[in-house]
Image: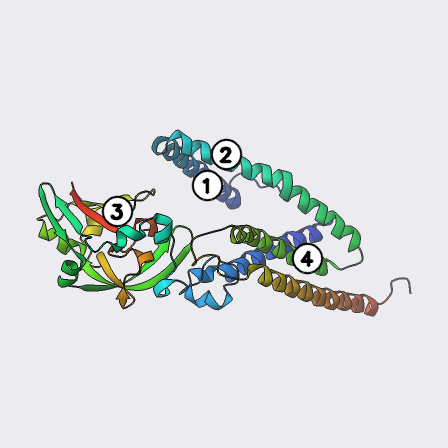
Amino acid sequence: VNPRDRQASRRGFLIGIGATAATLVALTAGQSFGVLDSLNLFAPRRQGFGPQTLPVNRTAQQAKVTELARDPGWQLEVRNGSRTEKLSRAALLALRQTEAELPIACVEGWSTNAHWRGVRLRDLMDRVGAPHDAGVRVSSFQPEGNYRVTTMGPEFVQDPTTLVALELNGENLDLDHGYPARIIAPGRPGVLQTKWLGSLEVIR
Amino acid sequence: MARLARGDPVRAARVALAATGVILTGVGIYFLVTTEPPKAVLGVVVWLAAAVVIHDGVIAPGTTAANALLSRVGRRLPHSALLVIRTGFGLGVVLTLVVVPELIAQARPHANPTILVGDYLGRLIVVWGVIVLAVAIATIALTWRTRRTIDQRPSIHG
């Protein structure tokens, strides 16, 4: 092979790989990037496809929480040592509500922005007298699952956009999005945005 | 490729890149074995070994066979046309590799109605059709252009 041909074939190889990679990205990245949505032929999810125009990673039925989530006696337990507050959904709705525009950014490779409304987590922490450098252990009432219990450092707890969300895109949170209440915080992967909240416990 | 002497900036850059890679790999391995349970480490090892087996056992032989076939069938085609054919075929194969697991998952029962929402098979067929058409047009155009250039060249045999 003469050197010119070899150089041409190396360049050709790089062009081929580049074109393939660019096409693959163009035809799948639309599940995370709105500008590519119209080209999204092969991604497993579509932006806006799901209850309240937001995809779901794990449905209420899959997490086996449907009955527990519909229980009218549900209360969110907020604990700091021996001090405990129990708040029904009505009680949470009666507190100061805050709105935030935050994405569900899933480690499975999709991302969608949504409009959330609920109670600031730090307001709830203040109610039980938690210091501002404390973290929180967040527990879901779902019976099983790797991320049933997660912890959150004070930098997330004190963020003004970290919410115990009660509404999504102008409606009551859908069962599949964590009704009666869920966590939504900035800069955390989707699996840590705990759905179907059971309790919040101050940790140090 | 020309041999690079000591003190050559390209060589220095390569050494720096390699050293950075080795250090980062070391850091990764250190945190892997110190923070993950043995079962997870074993899972990573199996995954990496499977990647090598699939590459050496399936992808490399497949690519070699396809290339051998193409060089025999396409002996009379210009280099540029062969490049277009390779790229088009490679693109189609990569997209197929992405779509096949989705088709398998779609065929199995799944409880989440917000995933696997597209007609992936139909779209894949259409995309393959577009690729074949584009490659055919480009191959014909490139071959025609190359032949015409050669025909117009004055003959050295007079």
Specify the subunit that label 1 lies on.
B
User: Disc 3 residue type?
Assistant: Phe
Residue at image coords 8%, 48%:
A129
- Which residue matches tag 4? B83
Kindly identify which residue carries mark 3.
Answer: A141
Q: Position of residue A196 (x, y in %)?
A: 27, 52
Chain for numbered disc 3 = A
Q: CA distance from mark 1 to mark 3?
A: 51 Å
Q: Looking at the image, can residue A60 be seen?
A: yes
Q: Are marks 4 and 3 on the same chain?
A: no
Image quarter (top left, top right, bottom left or bottom right) of the C terminus of chain A: top left
Amino acid at the residue labelled 4:
Leu
Foreground disc of the pair 4, 3: 3
- x, y percentage for residue A77? 16, 48
**SS type, badge 4:** helix
Disc on the earlier residue, 2 or 1: 1
Name the residue tied to disc 2: B46
- Looking at the rendered structure, the kind of residue marked 2 is Val
Whether pointer 3 and pointer 2 mark residues with C-beta atoms closer than 8 Å, the reply is: no
Q: Which picture quadrant has residue A168?
A: bottom left
How many other residues sit within 10 Å of disc 4, few (<14), some (14-19) or many (≥20)? many
Q: Position of residue B90 (x, y in %)?
A: 63, 54
Q: CA distance from mark 2 to mark 1?
A: 30 Å
Q: For the point 72% across and 64% down, which residue is it? A: B139
Q: Is residue A169 above or below residue A74?
A: below
Q: CA distance from mark 4 to mark 2?
A: 35 Å
Disc sitting over residue B16 in the figure: 1
Q: Is residue B112 left or right of residue A177?
A: right
Tag 1's secondary structure? helix
Answer with mark 1 or mark 4, whichever residue precedes in sequence. 1
